[in-house]
Amino acid sequence: MEALKQRILKDGKYLGNGILKVDNFINHQVDAGLMDACGLEFARLFADTGATRILTAEISGIAPALMAARHLNLPVVYARKSKPVTMPDTVYLTVAPSHTKGRMVELIVSPEYLARGERVIIIDDFLASGATILGLVRLAQAAGSEVVGIGTLIEKTFEGGRAALSGLGVPVHALAMIAAMDENGIRFAE
Amino acid sequence: MEALKQRILKDGKYLGNGILKVDNFINHQVDAGLMDACGLEFARLFADTGATRILTAEISGIAPALMAARHLNLPVVYARKSKPVTMPDTVYLTVAPSHTKGRMVELIVSPEYLARGERVIIIDDFLASGATILGLVRLAQAAGSEVVGIGTLIEKTFEGGRAALSGLGVPVHALAMIAAMDENGIRFAE
C-alpha cells in the first residue's frame, strides 16, 4: 500500500538490531486517517473470507484491527496481556515472545468473545518472526474458531514469519513488505 | 448519547464494588461502529476548542480516542504503561492509581509527540475518580501543552471525578453519565 510505504520512508527510523521505529504514526502517536485507509485496504483484501470476527493483540494491533473491523462491519477482540478483574476465572491463555520487550508475554482471551465456529481474521502491526500471530492462532484454535486470514501493516520478510504461517493455508497480507533495512535506508519487497 | 446508553443497558454488567463491565463493546471486544459514532460525537462537542492533538491512555482509551482523532483530523498519542525500547531515554512519566488493577500504574509519553504549545483534548473510556485523567493532564502540563477539553465515553458521577477536574476550567463531556448502579440496574443522570 503506497501511502503506508511512503510514510515508513518519511517517518520510520531504523534503530539497529532489526527494530524499525514507527512510533510517529503507529506505535505511540497514531495517524488515524492512515490507519483508516489501512483498514479499508484490509477490508478489500479479506472481503471474500466470510469472516465473523477480527482478533488482534493489545496494544499496537488495536488501531489497524479496529479500522478493519469498521470497514468489514465485524466485532474486534483484542487479546489482553494481563487478566483484568472484569474477565471470568477461566480463559484462553497462551504465551509468546515479545520482540520489543525481550521476554515472554501472555495473550489472554475470554471465552465470552471467541466462540466455537467463528471465522477469524488476525490483524497486527508487524509480521516479523510470526510468534505473536501464532500465539493468536493458538487462542483461536483453542476456542474452536477457524483462522481465515492474517493481515499486518508491516512485514519484515527477512525474519521468516511468512514461512512460519504457511502451514495454516490461509491468505497472509502485509500492506508494506520490508526486504532489507539498515542505517542507509529501507528497501521494500516487490 | 443515546446509542451508547442503550448499549450499556443491553450489554453492560454490574460486577459490584462500583465496577461496570463493558467488555462486550469497549474493553475486550470492541464495537468499531459504535466507537466511530462516539468519535463523531466527540468531534462535534470539541469542534471549537482549536485542539491540535488528542491524548489518551493505553489500552481502553485507544478506540474512542482514535475515532475522535479521525473525525477531528488530529494525531492521537497514547500514554504507554511501560517504556518500550523504541522510546528515547528521557520521557514524561507520572503515576496514577488504576481502578481495575488495584495498584499504581505508570503513564509515559515521549517528548517527541507532545510538544510545548500543543492544545490537547484528553479522551478516555471512563471518568470515575478522575485519577487517570489527572495523570494525563500532568503529562500534558509537563510538556508545556495546554489541555483544552476532556471527553470520556462513560462517567460514574458518584465517584467525584468531575469535581476533581473542575479546577482546570475546561469543558468535560461524558457521552453516558451513570448516576447510580446496583444489582437491579443502571440509572443515567439527566
Image (cartoon, coloured by chain):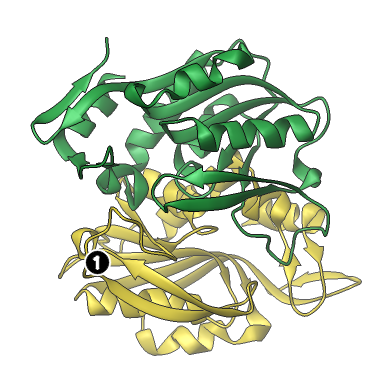
Chain colours: A yellow, B green
Give the residue drawn at x 83%, y 54%: B90
**Vertical comparison of B108 with B150: above or below:** below
Q: Quadrant of residue A5?
A: bottom right
Q: Say which amino acid is labelled 1.
A: Arg
Give the residue drawn at x 47%, y 66%: A151
Residue A88 located left or right of residue B102: left
Please state the total of marks drawn on the protein image: 1
Front position in the image: A116 or A7: A116
Residue A96 located left or right of residue B148: left
Circle 1 — which element? strand
Q: Quadrant of residue B84?
A: bottom right
Residue A118 at x, y = what percent?
20, 65
Q: Quadrant of residue A21?
A: bottom right
Quadrant (top left/top right/bottom left/bottom right) for the N terminus of chain A: bottom right
Quadrant (top left/top right/bottom left/bottom right) for the C terminus of chain A: bottom right
Crowding near pointer 1: few (<14 within 10 Å), some, many (20+)?
A: many
Asked whether residue B164 is in view, the answer is yes
Query: Which residue lies most toward the right here?
Result: A184
Front position in the image: A177 or A90: A90
**Vertical comparison of A100 with B33: above or below:** below
Residue B149 at x, y = what percent?
58, 19
Residue beneath label 1, please?
Answer: A119
